[in-house]
């Protein structure tokens, strides 16, 4: 079974547990913190994967390091270590965040522009495009890309809204080439 399917199953189980115990937001906050810890400190993952350390040593480190976290998150980490699933922790967090965003009507999106957009501009883009993809709002990541010349290109999942100058030029070029080939 692929890592992504396994990560999704753990995320789904945690999401259901969060719903039952009314802890969805708490879990999300803790998982976001956990993601930052794992990304900024590769030694933790190396330790958890290292065969020389026993599972008990790894579980003890998790208990001590994450004592401020909820019991459910700590137990999940211990379970993943017991089952040698340390590799899926970041994917599982990403899947959980995606599930909670879906429940809230939020979608992640990348917006490409020639310059950094202000918060007000991002807010207007979110308000304009969220209804078009059936969401209440968009969680935008601004990517500066001078090659688009002007305008913006928005990517939500596998949908792309291209209002860039370079995109318009490509469409004009295709139209001109298709009329010349007739």
Image: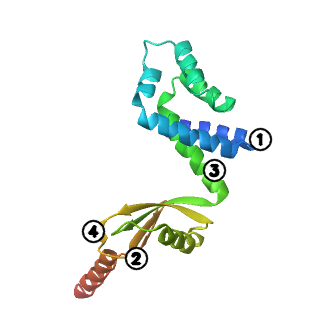
User: In the figure, is residue 78 to the left or right of 163?
Assistant: right
The earlier-in-sequence mark between 4 and 2 is 4
Residue 20: give its label. 1
Image: 170 above or below 85: below
Q: Which residue is mark 4?
A: 147
Q: Position of residue 115 (x, y in %)?
A: 35, 68
User: In the figure, is residue 178 to the left or right of 76?
Assistant: left
| Cα–Cα span, label 2 and label 3 | 30 Å
| Cα–Cα span, label 2 and label 1 | 43 Å
| Cα–Cα span, label 3 and label 1 | 14 Å
Q: Which residue is mark 3?
A: 100
Query: On the image, which quarter does residue 31 sit in?
Result: top right
| Cα–Cα span, label 4 and label 2 | 13 Å
Local SS, label 2: loop
Image: 28 above or below 147: above
The earlier-in-sequence mark between 3 and 4 is 3
| Cα–Cα span, label 3 and label 4 | 34 Å
Q: Residues within 10 Å of mark 3 (few under 14, many from 20)?
A: some
Local SS, label 4: helix
Image: 172 above or below 53: below
Toward the viewer: 123 or 111? 123
Q: Position of residue 181 (x, y in %)?
A: 23, 84
Q: Residues within 10 Å of mark 1 (few under 14, many from 20)?
A: few
Which residue is painted at 38% across and 61% down in the image?
143
The earlier-in-sequence mark between 2 and 1 is 1
Residue 163: give its label. 2
Q: Please say whether residue 83 is visible from this viewpoint.
A: no
| Cα–Cα span, label 4 and label 1 | 48 Å
Local SS, label 1: helix
């Amino acid at each position: 079974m692929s890592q992504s399917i396994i990560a999704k199953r753990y995320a789904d189980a945690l999401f259901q547990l969060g719903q039952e115990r009314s802890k969805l937001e708490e879990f999300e906050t803790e998982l976001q913190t956990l993601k930052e810890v794992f990304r900024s400190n590769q030694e933790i993952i190396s330790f958890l994967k290292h065969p020389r350390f026993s599972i008990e040593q790894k579980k003890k480190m998790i208990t001590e390091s994450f004592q401020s976290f909820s019991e459910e998150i700590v137990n999940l980490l211990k379970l993943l270590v017991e089952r040698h699933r340390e590799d899926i922790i970041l994917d599982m967090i990403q899947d959980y965040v995606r599930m909670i965003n879906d429940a809230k009507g939020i979608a992640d999106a990348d917006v490409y522009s020639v310059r950094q957009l202000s918060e007000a501009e991002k807010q207007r883009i979110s308000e304009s495009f969220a209804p078009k993809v059936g969401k209440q709002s968009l969680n935008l990541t601004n990517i500066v890309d001078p090659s688009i010349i002007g305008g913006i290109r928005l990517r939500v999942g596998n949908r792309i809204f291209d209002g860039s100058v370079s995109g318009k030029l490509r469409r004009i070029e295709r139209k001109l080439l298709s009329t010349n080939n007739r």
